[in-house]
Amino acid sequence: MKTINQSIFWSVFLVSLMVLGCKSDPKNATSAPDSSSGIEVNKEQGQAFIDDDTSEPNILNIAIKSPDHTTLVAAVQAADLENALVNAGPLMVFAPTDEAFKALPAGTVEDLLKPENKDALANILKFHVTPGKYEKDFLKKFKKLGQANDQNVPVEVRGDDVYVGGAKIIASVPASNGIIHVVDKVMLPPQE
């Protein structure tokens, strides 16, 4: 009987140590209530928030370091989609430049970045993501692509240029979890 009680005691003790050891420093955590459970969760959880200077850069790492994609990164952060862009993938991200965002009607970006428009912003951003890792030349074989927001986007070939949703691919950057196709326009999903 003592052996069983000691086993239970040591099991509970070890589990308690593991739980305490996994807790983060509450002074550095930013928490928000999880609307589905009412439990406080750290906003900056997940693989996107792990510092890693030795691995090949993923899509999010590349976007963050790009001086031409600061608006896109701000939008991804406002929509809480950072972890989606570090997913194992492979993913194709059609990444509008800051100039592409500036071409939208005045006030559009500022309006989309408001917390109450988070769902609309996430829908637009997901319209820029496709599963797979296809080079620009291979995309010429497609008529349309299925996007992460469950809508399709047309693919057009004009000479040597490839347009996805009316946005011209102007550069491509490989990433550890896919490929970034830099585009000259923000693609807006069709209204349903």
Image (cartoon, grey):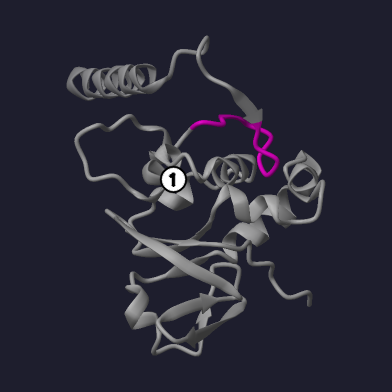
Residue 59 position within the rendered picture, expressed as x and y whole percent measured from the top left? 38, 51
| The C terminus: image quadrant | bottom right
Q: Position of residue 114 (x, y in %)?
A: 77, 40
Q: Is residue 135 visible?
A: yes
Q: Where is mark 1, residue-wise?
A: 63
**Can see residue 179?**
no
Question: Which image quadrant for residue 188?
Answer: bottom right
Q: Is residue 5 magenta?
A: no
Vertical position of residue 45 compared to residue 79: above or below = above
Q: Is residue 185 left or right of residue 142?
A: right
Residue 38 among those drawn in magenta: yes
Q: Over which residues does the magenta segment extend?
A: 33-44
Q: Is residue 121 above or below residue 17?
A: below
Could you tell me residue 186's position as x and y percent?
63, 61
Res 62 → quadrant = top left
**Closer to the camera in the image, 27 or 117:** 117
- At x 50%, y 90%, the residue is 143
